């Protein structure tokens, strides 16, 4: 029957194309359908179908909706045939080995992206492969993100195993030259047709294909159109072909944008208040602003942070800045007043650039500059990058004694803070001490004997309750450290700045229970969800002359200019942030984790743009104070902040800080 059907289609092809039967038989002997070809192609084509299905499921589980379903199907079929189709050329054993390798590779790509996006709400960049070895340090966090969905991405492997067991062996004959050419031609035509289709559709809708190839509108949009594996190939190509210097046109663009960026001269409020004094910059892992004053069942979640806040100047509308480098990106942004990268960990990608960071400028004023962290020296490449930021010394897990508590990884916060106190008191004054805590890192697994909060009856998820216990534990360690410090002679000559590195990533916008816990009885809208993500930033000076709260929008981008003003350092034209004590027009933007410059939020005193779900400006929402208004009212705010991000990328990637100075 199969042979008869094959002969029929062969005759139709001959008749339609007007070809000589002998010529067709020369290239397609016993084609198009025979038992031999069916057995030879059944497994590869099954895997192509499964590949297309899992790409769609990835998008569905990632809340990317079903937009561009047909487009994504066609181009994914093209890629799937290009990946799995060559197996048709191989005999049985070689076919099984080849398909297993390809299937495992694409499965790992999809699974890695899915786990990463579950935590970071972004896409894993190929540049992250350079620091994949760090996963051993965060294995508990990774394990917490592995759910029941992941096995689907690896379904190709059991299918291959089942086929090896059940399917009869294909005839082990070698394909003729003409048969191989025909298979290769069919694979190429399918792949070209798939990509050609999407290029034609893109050109018809956008007038050009450059937005898809060279300048994708945003990462979500690209994954919607081509699927996550095609996106990964794009990311690899972009990484391999990226430029490491600026063209003449890009230099001109920097100069144009720079003229629009208003230089902020030295302020008159508190300028030089801390000149010559010690400064401690404490970075608390995953601490959020709502912890300040928060009680559960009558208990303060972070009583020591509350105590510190009472005697400090608080910035209550302060937003973090992180990309793929998470905590290290928050440090980079705070210490350089430049935006982190959106597609890689900045300290990994450009550790040896010429920077003019805050520690370097303080060091020029005679400060001893040190960083203290209870983790590995090479985590986020800090050990290599910190000298470029002006640090004389970086003490890490190798420089501390491990205590009894085993929390997260590295040195537990009580031991870390206790030993850090001894290290800080031994420093030459004046000093800049950057203190980085660790124990409140996700997934927030705290041993039962270390949990102090009574959370009985609290309607929160297990993860959210674990977070409360974890920050309470970290707060106790911070409190003991501050108590020792304030009783010492250093207190009279040392300012302390405290911030959170980023949010805890413990809830999504639709989590109504979490919203009520934070006081939003009607659930989150885009504005209130953004507000819930803010982190603390507080400055306590020795004479307590700076206290109170400032609700102006601010971010890590503003840390350097603000502390520099207090330390009496002249302002720099390379700052993209502002001195928060002398800024009549505060502005904030947070970029997305993306291969292209994209904005997740932008804010000034009056307007807020929120674009969580898409980087297309029109898909975002605009608020004037708390009232939603037409999106066009945020256009100028959006464009201005996007230009700053593009400017920062050119400076960092081209190592051309001199263009801003």
Image (cartoon, grey):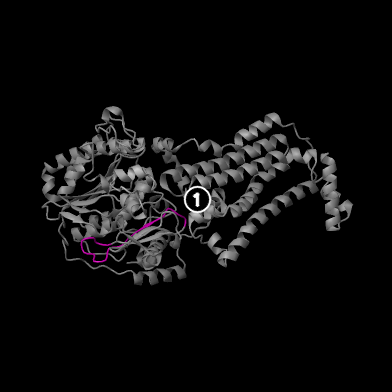
Give left or right: position of 626 versus 240: left
> Foreground: 376 or 417?
417
Q: Is residue 426 visible?
A: no
Q: Position of residue 610 (x, y in %)?
A: 38, 57
Measured along the vertical axis of the image, is residue 17 above or below residue 411? Answer: below
Is 631 left or right of 316, judged from the image as shown?
Answer: right
Question: Which of 654 and 410 lies nearest the eye of the viewer?
Answer: 410
Q: Position of residue 543 (x, y in %)?
A: 10, 52
Q: Main secondary structure of the magenta part?
A: loop
Residue at the spot x=22%, y=37% of the render?
477
In the displayed orientation, state which residue is furthest to the front: 522
Q: Decide whether residue 528 is among the magenta residues.
A: no
Bounds of the magenta segment: 578-595
Task: Determine crowd level at label 1: few under 14, some 14-19, many 20+ residues with C-alpha closer than 10 A.
Answer: some
The answer to which quarter of the image holds residue 657 is bottom left
Q: Quadrant of the C terminus?
A: bottom left
Residue 579 sits inside the magenta stretch: yes
- Residue 274 drawn at (x, y percent): 16, 56
């Amino acid at each position: 029957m199969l042979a008869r059907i094959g002969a029929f289609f062969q005759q139709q092809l001959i008749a339609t194309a007007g070809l000589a039967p002998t010529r067709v038989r020369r290239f397609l002997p016993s084609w198009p359908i025979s038992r031999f070809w069916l057995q030879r192609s059944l497994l590869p084509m099954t895997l192509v179908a499964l590949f297309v299905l899992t790409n769609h499921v990835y998008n569905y589980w990632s809340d990317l909706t079903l937009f561009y379903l047909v487009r994504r199907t066609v181009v994914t079929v093209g890629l799937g045939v290009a990946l799995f189709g060559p197996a048709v050329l191989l005999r049985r054993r070689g076919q099984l080995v080849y398909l297993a390798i390809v299937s495992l590779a694409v499965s790992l790509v999809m699974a890695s992206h899915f786990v990463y996006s579950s935590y970071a709400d972004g896409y894993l960049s190929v540049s992250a492969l350079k620091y994949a070895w760090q996963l051993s340090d965060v294995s508990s966090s990774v394990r917490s993100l592995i759910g029941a969905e992941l096995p689907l991405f690896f379904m190709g492997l059991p299918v291959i195993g089942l086929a090896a067991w059940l399917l009869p062996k294909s005839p082990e004959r070698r394909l003729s030259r003409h048969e191989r050419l025909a298979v290769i031609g069919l694979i190429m035509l399918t792949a070209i047709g798939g990509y050609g289709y999407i290029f034609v559709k893109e050109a018809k809708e956008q007038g050009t294909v450059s937005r898809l190839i060279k300048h994708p509108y945003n990462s979500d949009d690209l994954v919607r159109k081509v699927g996550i594996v095609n996106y990964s190939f794009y990311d690899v190509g972009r990484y391999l072909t990226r430029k490491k210097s600026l063209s003449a046109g890009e230099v001109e663009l920097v100069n144009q944008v720079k003229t629009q960026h208003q230089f902020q001269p030295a302020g008159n409020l508190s300028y030089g208040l801390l000149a010559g004094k010690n400064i401690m910059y404490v970075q608390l892992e995953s601490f959020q602003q709502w912890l300040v004053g928060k009680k559960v069942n009558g208990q303060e979640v972070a009583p020591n942070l509350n105590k510190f806040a009472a005697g400090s100047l608080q910035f209550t509308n302060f937003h973090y800045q992180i990309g793929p480098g998470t905590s290290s990106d928050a440090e980079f942004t705070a210490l350089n007043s430049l935006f982190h990268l959106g597609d890689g960990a900045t300290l990994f990608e450009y550790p040896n650039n010429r920077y003019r960071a805050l520690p370097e400028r303080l060091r020029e004023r005679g400060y001893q500059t040190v960083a203290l962290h209870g983790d590995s020296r090479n985590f986020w490449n800090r050990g290599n990058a910190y000298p470029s930021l002006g640090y004389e010394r970086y003490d890490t897990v190798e420089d501390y004694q491990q205590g009894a508590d085993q929390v997260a990884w590295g040195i537990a916060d009580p031991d870390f803070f206790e030993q850090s106190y001894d290290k800080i008191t031994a420093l030459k004054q004046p000093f800049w001490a950057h203190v980085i805590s660790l124990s409140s890192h996700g997934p927030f697994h705290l041993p039962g004997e270390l949990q102090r909060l009574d959370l009985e009856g609290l309607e929160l998820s297990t993860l959210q309750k674990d977070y409360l216990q974890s920050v309470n534990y970290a707060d106790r360690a911070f409190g003991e450290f501050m108590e020792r410090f304030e009783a010492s002679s250093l207190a009279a000559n040392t300012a302390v700045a405290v911030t959170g590195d980023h949010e805890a990533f413990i809830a999504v916008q639709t989590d109504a229970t979490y919203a009520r816990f934070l006081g939003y009885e009607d659930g989150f809208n885009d504005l209130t969800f953004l507000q819930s993500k803010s982190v603390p930033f507080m400055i306590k000076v020795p004479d307590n002359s700076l206290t109170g709260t400032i609700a102006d929008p601010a971010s890590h981008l503003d840390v350097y200019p603000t502390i520099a003003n207090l330390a009496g350092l002249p302002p720099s034209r390379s700052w993209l942030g502002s001195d928060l004590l002398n800024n009549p027009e505060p502005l904030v933007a947070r970029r997305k984790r993306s291969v292209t410059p994209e904005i997740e939020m932008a804010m000034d005193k009056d307007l807020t743009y929120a674009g969580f779900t898409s980087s297309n400006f029109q898909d975002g929402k605009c608020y004037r104070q708390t009232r939603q208004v037409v999106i066009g009212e945020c256009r100028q705010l959006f464009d201005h902040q996007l230009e700053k991000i593009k400017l920062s990328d050119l400076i960092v990637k081209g190592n051309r800080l001199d263009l801003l100075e």
